[in-house]
Image: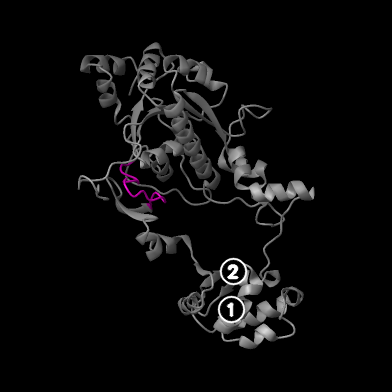
Amino acid sequence: MKQDRQTGGIAPRPLEGIRIVEVGVWHAGPGASAILGDLGAEIIKIESLSGDPERYFGTFGALPPIEADIPNWTLLFEITNRNKKGICLDIDTEAGQAILHALVKEADIFVTNLRQSTKPKIGIDYASLAKVNPKLIYANVSGFGPVGPMSDVGGFDPLGQAISGMSFMTGAEEPTLLQTIILDQLTAIAASHAILTALVTRERQGIGQEVQVSLYGTATWLLHANLLCSSLLKQTAQVRWDRSRNPPLRNMFKCQDGKWIMGANHPEHKYWPTFCEAVGEKELAVDPRFATPELRKANMPELIARLDGLFAKKPQKEWLEILLAAGLLFAPIQQLADVVDDPQALTNGYMVDFEHRALGKIRVPGYPIRFSAHEVGTHGPAPELGEHTDSVLAALGYTERDIGRLRDEKVIR
């Protein structure tokens, strides 16, 4: 843990004292709260009496379910709901609405990703909650945006990838989805960005507001360069990756040990002589077939084939040492399992050890940004079903008798 340089104790988290109330399911909305929880915000997740469906159906695409000896739990639920307090509440009742309003009144932020037509029916639309707390930051995450013909259509990660053009980004003839919950996570990041911006605005101007984030909108933001080029060209700006047609200084090569390396050096003409000397083929720099970028482009398949044979003579580690020592930009191409144990990731806190109450010691992605004066990162597991219902209600002033009565009336679980 990071030490506070002034007090010598554990450093505080940057969002300590900020409270979030969440009524959401799956990842794109609730994932934003989890990120803000990494920064220290207190999150109270309101689930129905049966719980968030992600507790039961959190499979990873084509991957088999990852099970643990915990009822009502999936790994995806854990990812989405770390750092949160969980209560089970029927907000479609008068007593449930009273509890919801008591929580919202004391909250800074409300997060939801339920459909536009559903929210007014259960009293969690912005207009209703702004009456309870006019300074509330209300984050609304949708599939396709707040207006238009698809504004009330539910959305999941694959649908966002589909409509935005992401599924054709590989250049293949058939669409290919990026796995797993890539766009959901990116939308969660975008939502956290929007929430923090609105929070700063409230601190400076004293106003609450609703912010709208969607899977579709986030995807177009990610694809900014691709979409801008497509707009200018009046056609899809997309090129399928082809090693035999790509310049050697922006290419990938398979090494002797079967591992790959990736280069990205710009401008190419500046680094071409250095590269040739580093790989022991100094004559390539003056070879009439490869001496200029134009000549290399014309003879690229022949050049890449020659370099393939060269890189096959040394293992990845040795090639990286040679190329980096020459001041060239290369990196190992890793599998996901490699990243979990990668010293560079571990040293920077991109992967961290976490002691989970049920899973034991596991390694999880860390918060990727460092603060000189604050501690950040996962600090608590996802809640068990209704785990904090009693303690949250007690903090609102409900007595044990009140809580028992609400449970008997099936307002809470």
Query: At x 79% / y 47%, what residue is drawn?
Result: 234
Query: Is 309 on the left or on the right of 256, as rendered?
Result: right
Q: Is residue 373 left or right of residue 344?
A: left
Q: Is residue 92 in the magenta section? A: no
Q: Would you say the residues marked 2 and 1 are in contact, meaning their CB atoms lie under 8 Å apart?
A: yes
Residue type, mark 2 in image? Asn
- Quarter of image, res 200: top left
Horizontal and vertical percent position of residue 163: 66, 41
SS class of the residue under badge 2? loop
Q: Secondary structure at mark 1?
A: helix
> Is 354 above or below relative to 128?
below
Q: How is the image coloured?
A: one colour
Give 379 or 284, whichever is nearer the viewer. Answer: 284
Instruction: Give the residue pinned by disc 2.
Output: 265
Which contiguous range is marked in magenta? Answer: 365-381
Q: Which mark is residue 189?
A: none
* Quarter of the image that includes the C terminus: top left
260 vs 228, left or right, is: left
**Three-letter amino acid code of the residue under disc 1:** Phe
Identify the residue at horizontal 48%, vertical 17% (top origin).
122
Give the x, y percent position of residue 229.
Answer: 72, 50
Q: Of the residues under marks 2 and 1, which one precedes in the sequence?
A: 2
Seen at 26% across and 22% down, the residue is: 395
